[in-house]
Image: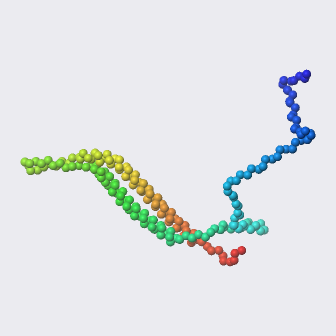
Amino acid sequence: MARVDPIHPVPPPPPSKPTTPDGKKPSPPPKPPPVTIDPGFTVEYRPSDTPKAAPPKDGAPPPAPAPPTHSAMSVSLEQLSNAEKTALSGLTTLVASYTALRSTVDSQADTIFGQKLTWVFHDPNVEAKTWTTQVLPDPLAASGQAFAQIINPAMNQALDDLATALEVLGSFVKCLEAAGDGYAAADFRSQFGAAGPKT
């Protein structure tokens, strides 16, 4: 009986290759059919219609590529100017109304709800045929002050929100003006190409 080295054991023999009963190697299993997943859409590629630059001749630098073509566009600067004027006129009216409302609120916020309500007391003196006048605070003034502490911040917040809306509208009018200036500058700098047959 052979002795086995516990430190260097003998490796097991390699597995035998499978064979058929006639001693031939079995044929590999057939490959599974490919799996096709329909994404639900198709992708179509079309080359650009932009003409390509001609190859350089005699080592000369290549010419600049032709600019891309696009469909014609039409901009009415008159209609754009009229829209700007209409928006600016409406904004001017709104600003005037807001300024008047803000001035009214600021001037009457401390008294409009009866915060400083008083009443006058006349104390007659029959013998002297005179009377003494006293101005006393009205008991309802405390209620007016309590209400003003609640409603005044709400009114100021509403006025601030209105001012923000007017500011946004003013920014829109400026965008209309910038768009008109841009189209006018583009029209002024436009040039026609040389006349001739297309190749």
Where is residue 107? Give x, y as percent: 32, 55
Q: Is residue 69 left or right of residue 140?
A: right
- In this orientation, does residue 149 appear? yes
Q: Nearer the viewer, residue 184 or 25?
A: 25
Residue drawn at 43 percent across, 59 percent down? 166
Q: Pick out the residue farthest to the left.
A: 127
Residue drawn at 52 percent across, 70 percent down? 77
Q: Is residue 152 left or right of residue 79?
A: left
Where is residue 43? Give x, y as percent: 69, 58
Q: Which part of the image, by quadrant, shows the C terminus?
A: bottom right
Residue drawn at 87 percent across, 28 percent down? 10
Tally of marks:
0
Where is residue 16? Give x, y as percent: 88, 35
Q: Is residue 68 left or right of residue 80?
A: right
Q: Is residue 182 left or right of residue 169?
A: right
Q: Pick out the residue farthest to the bottom.
A: 196
Q: Which part of the image, by quadrant, shows the N terminus?
A: top right
- In this orientation, does residue 185 appear? no
Where is residue 179? Give x, y as percent: 53, 65
Res 103 quadrant in image: bottom left
Q: Pick out the residue farthest to the front.
A: 21
Residue drawn at 70 percent across, 53 percent down? 38
Q: What coloring was used for the rendering?
A: rainbow
Residue 163 drawn above or below residue 76: above
Q: Nearer the viewer, residue 56 or 45?
A: 45
